[in-house]
Image (cartoon, rainbow, N blue to C red):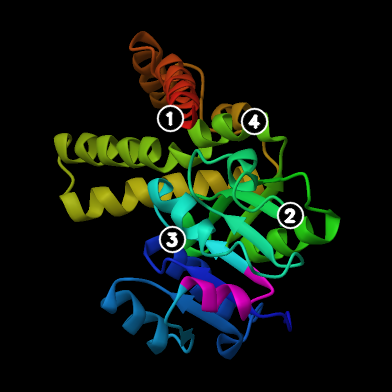
């Protein structure tokens, strides 16, 4: 368990998921976490989680060794403006999409900054997060950020120029997978399965296949071949997917989302 104090500004879906994951994995004690949010319901949730709810952004900054910025990108600059007088040793972790470390450092030029791109499965402890360091962040700061995000799934450091690609893949990826699950469910209903059973079978199939790739180190192509018999049912289904450019559509989706992320970050 880290003995440092942690502050978070913004206790929405992602912010609360991060904090609950850290508490649940014993990375931080709830009493060492302080929160600021303008929404009374979010403050209530934070208090119920055992955190200390403070009255201002500046107060969170002065009482924390690490501060997570969990607000919408449009108000990040305003939040950072309230943190200009905090200790130069205080680590700032931003989870705001599209806001580069350089932009953050224009407001807090002397602070160590780590930018993180998490995704929504962090809410169930199965997140995929990428992080990148600013010019003042050292290995110790990256290690702290990795411990925090690693408590919620997988976390990897990448160069900042790849953060838009991360956004296009793992940031937007849960939506692509949700479409796959939804379509598989409808396919099951079409051939006679009750919707509840079809949904569970589809979601569990996606979960199981992902676990085989990750936990058994099975390449996706090898996993495909394991269930694709000559002249069988699976190759018949795959031929339909190929005819409709299923793989190409997913590849293009990642590319389009990456391009949009770059546009939004300008």
Instruction: Give yes or no for contact between labels 4 and 1 (Cβ–Cβ under 8 Å).
Output: no
Q: Is residue 219 visible?
A: no
Measured Cα–Cα span from mark 4 to mark 1: 15 Å
Q: What element carries label 4?
A: helix
Q: What element carries label 2?
A: loop
Measured Cα–Cα span from mark 2 to mark 3: 27 Å
- Dot in front, 2 or 1: 2
Instruction: Give yes or no for contact between labels 2 and 3 (Cβ–Cβ under 8 Å).
Output: no
Residue 236 occupies quadrant: top left
Q: Which of marks 4 and 1 is nearer the N terminus?
A: 4
Region in magenta: 57-66
> Pointer 1: what residue?
264
> Pointer 4: what residue?
162
Task: Classify 10 Å Cα crowding around label 1: few (below 14), some (14-19), many (20 and above).
Answer: few
- Dot in front, 4 or 2: 2
Measured Cα–Cα span from mark 4 to mark 2: 24 Å
> Pointer 2: what residue?
110
The quarter of the picture where the N terminus appears is bottom right
């Amino acid at each position: 368990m880290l003995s440092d104090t942690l502050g978070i500004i913004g206790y929405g879906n992602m912010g609360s998921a991060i904090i609950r994951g850290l508490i649940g994995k014993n990375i931080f004690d709830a009493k060492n976490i302080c929160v600021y949010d303008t929404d009374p319901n979010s403050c209530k949730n934070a208090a119920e989680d055992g955190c200390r709810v403070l009255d201002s952004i500046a107060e969170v900054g002065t009482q924390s060794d690490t501060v997570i910025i969990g607000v919408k990108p449009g108000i990040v600059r305003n939040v950072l403006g309230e943190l200009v007088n905090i200790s130069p040793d205080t680590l700032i972790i931003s989870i705001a999409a599209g806001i580069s470390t350089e932009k953050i450092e224009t407001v807090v030029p002397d602070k160590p900054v780590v930018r993180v791109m998490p995704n929504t499965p962090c809410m169930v402890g199965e997140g995929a997060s990428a992080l990148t360091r600013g010019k003042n962040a050292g290995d110790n700061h990256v290690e702290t950020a990795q411990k925090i995000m690693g408590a919620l799934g997988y976390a990897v450091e990448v160069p900042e120029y790849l953060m838009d690609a991360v956004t296009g893949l793992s940031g937007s990826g849960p939506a692509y997978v949700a479409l796959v699950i939804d379509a598989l469910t409808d396919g099951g209903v079409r051939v006679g399965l009750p919707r509840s059973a079809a949904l569970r079978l589809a979601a569990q199939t996606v979960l199981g296949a992902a676990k085989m790739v990750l936990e058994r180190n099975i390449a996706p192509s090898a996993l495909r071949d394991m269930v694709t018999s000559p002249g069988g049912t699976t190759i018949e289904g795959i031929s339909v997917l190929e005819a409709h450019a299923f793989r190409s559509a997913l590849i293009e989706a990642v590319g389009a989302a990456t391009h949009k992320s770059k546009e939004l970050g300008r």
